[in-house]
Image (cartoon, helix red, strand yellow):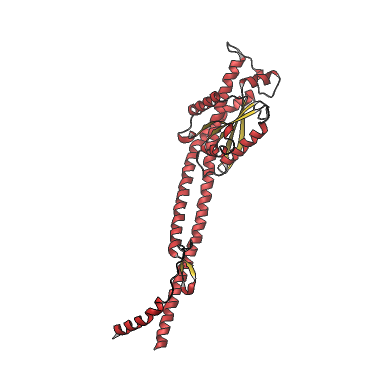
Amino acid sequence: MAMAVFRREGRRLLPSIAARPIAATTPSPLSSDREEGPFGVRSISTQVVRNRMKSVKNIQKITKAMKMVAASKLRAVQGRAENSRGLWQPFTALLGDNPSIDVKKSVVVTLSSDKGLCGGINSTVVKVSRALYKLNAGPEKDVKFVIVGEKAKAIMFRDSKNDISLTVTELNKNPLNYAQVSVLADDILKNVEFDALRIVYNKFHSVVAFLPTVATVLSPEIIEKESEVGGKLGELDSYEIEGGETKGEILQNLAEFQFSCVMFNAVLENACSEMGARMSAMDSSSRNAGEMLDRLTLTYNRTRQASITTELIEIISGASALEAAK
């Protein structure tokens, strides 16, 4: 008897259901994130919120791991960078450091990182390098770039491709040592002609602080010329040259050794700055992920509570309707 009544009711309702037109609709970008609630109210899907919470948790794990890796690498490089400062300081006292010297051929050596996610250290050295180019460029002057690092190479190739003489990447792929950097310095000296080399790098101060620095290395000819005219040099004139070598040969050897020592210190200082900046960036990312996770958790709890409340209201309304029908 009950089945017969159900079939009669089904036949009576079937025409009204079939009479409703089914319009073809284009799926909205929000259709995957939201579901239709009662009376046409759109509500956020708890499944979507759970998926987002899971994604944010995974990102937070990655950023925390990257911070720990950067911290371990920083401890390994920081001591070597501090010890390397004693290599170039005697050369500064002997030959001086005159970044504002006016020469015809200048080479700007820009040190950057091969990887990103390390704050603004790469954009900073690029800005300083471009400023040095504008200061030293002129009608009878030639300024070239030597780029060390993938990030500075990608930025400088956009507008200064014709002024780049040499690019070097993946320098930090192996642990840095003086032999490796001296080979790099020798390649730079063989491939470029210069009166002054200006090395632009980030000097490490602390995990949250680094200072863009410019170190200047003059060619032997310019050093000898400045010495003759009484230019701004260090204590070179207070020493007497003994032995079979001439002053030019000694200055040539000193200039090459000075450049390799300055490059070694600059590479280590820049590596420390990179690791410190990456630690700060990953720490900020981890905190932001935690704040986002808190907001998503609150949204998830509110959405779940709203769905439970809606179901309870429907159950109570149905029970009330059945009691009223009796």
- Residue 168 location (% of width, % of height): 51, 32
Q: Is residue 109 visible?
A: no
Does residue 35 lie above or below 180 as drawn? below
On-image quarter of the N terminus? bottom left
- Using the image as rendered, state which of residue 61 and residue 131 is in the foreground: 131
**At 50% across and 51% down in the image, what residue appears?**
286
- Seen as rendered, the residue at the extreme top is 244
- Residue 161 location (% of width, % of height): 57, 35
- Using the image as rendered, state which of residue 294 and residue 23 is in the foreground: 23
Does residue 22 lie above or below 289 as drawn? below
- Seen as rendered, the residue at the extreme bottom is 326
Residue 97 falls in which quadrant of the image? top right
Does residue 207 lie above or below 95 as drawn? below
Q: Can residue 61 be seen in this view?
A: yes
On-image quarter of the C terminus? bottom left
- Seen as rendered, the residue at the extreme left is 1
Residue 313 falls in which quadrant of the image? bottom left
- Using the image as rendered, state which of residue 262 and residue 31 is in the foreground: 31
**At 53% across and 32% down in the image, what residue appears?**
167
**Picture mark count:** 0
Residue 134 falls in which quadrant of the image? top right
Does residue 50 lie above or below 313 as drawn? above
- Residue 282 location (% of width, % of height): 51, 47
**At 46% across and 52% down in the image, what residue appears?**
59
